[in-house]
Amino acid sequence: MAAEREVTLYFDPLCPWAFMTSQWLREVHTVRPVSVRFRLMSLAVLNEAEELTDEMERRAGEIFDAIDAMGGGSMLEGCIKGIEENWFQGRIADSAYELERAFNAGERVVVGANRFLEGNEEGFGDILRITQEQEERQRTRLDAVRRDRDDEKVAAARDRIAFEAADPETNLMPALIDASHAYVTLGEMMSTLGGVFGRHTEVPSI
């Protein structure tokens, strides 16, 4: 059996990308010899002006203390409990609301967005919108791929993914690449992996 590998995640509790990565690492931890080490940090501290560092550090410290308390002295257990109880989801929602409120009220200046707009006369360009017609066109293409592909190769590729995913020592990338060559869709790959690892169901909370 391979030696346990330590993975360090620099984790901002208010960053949704860090939140999703922590969920993924939590699942990996159950099936791979991986020890996850969370190093808490604040992107806000890094991005704010230097004179605000002390205040942001204080706020970050409050968040870190809350996570530590939720885990009974363990940051990792606190992060897991925070995910299960939607603590992070609530804090992210609150942060997003406060950011949007401050932006609209002019309390938070974003250069080029709500202040110092000179030179922006051309606007921000067209917004990408996916129309019903484009969606139907893509569905038609997907149906054609599924109709023309070799179903036996698809089934074999999915069986291989499931088999190798159950082995914590196996690198899944070759199986996933070969599955794509057999025209296994991304959704089918995810469904197969979900059958092995299970699925996280986020419960909305207010």
Image (cartoon, grey):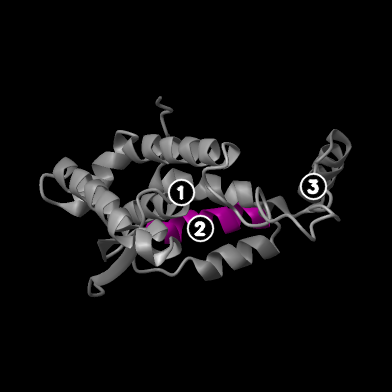
Q: Are marks 1 and 2 in contact (CB under 8 Å)?
A: no
Q: Amino acid at mark 2?
A: Ile
The residue positioned 80% from the left and 61% from the top of the image is 119
Q: Quadrant of residue 121?
A: bottom right
Camera-nearest residue between 28 and 43: 43
Q: Check residue 55 in the rendering and tell me which mark sits there, or answer none.
A: none
Give SS at disc 1. helix
Q: Check residue 161 in the rendering and tell me which mark sits there, or answer none.
A: 2
Does residue 170 appear in the picture of this structure? yes
- Measure the alpha-carbon separation of dots 1 and 3: 23 Å
Give the residue at mark 3.
128
Name the N-terminal-most of marks 3 and 2. Answer: 3
Q: Main secondary structure of the magenta part?
A: helix
Give the residue at mark 1.
16
Q: Quadrant of residue 169?
A: bottom left
Give SS at disc 2. helix
Give the crowd class for mark 2: few <14, some 14-19, many >=20 residues within 10 Å: many
Give the crowd class for mark 1: few <14, some 14-19, many >=20 residues within 10 Å: some
- Measure the alpha-carbon separation of dots 3 and 2: 35 Å
Number of disc labels: 3
Q: Position of residue 185 (x, y in %)?
A: 66, 51
- Boundaries of the magenta span: 153-166
Does residue 167 appear in the picture of this structure? no
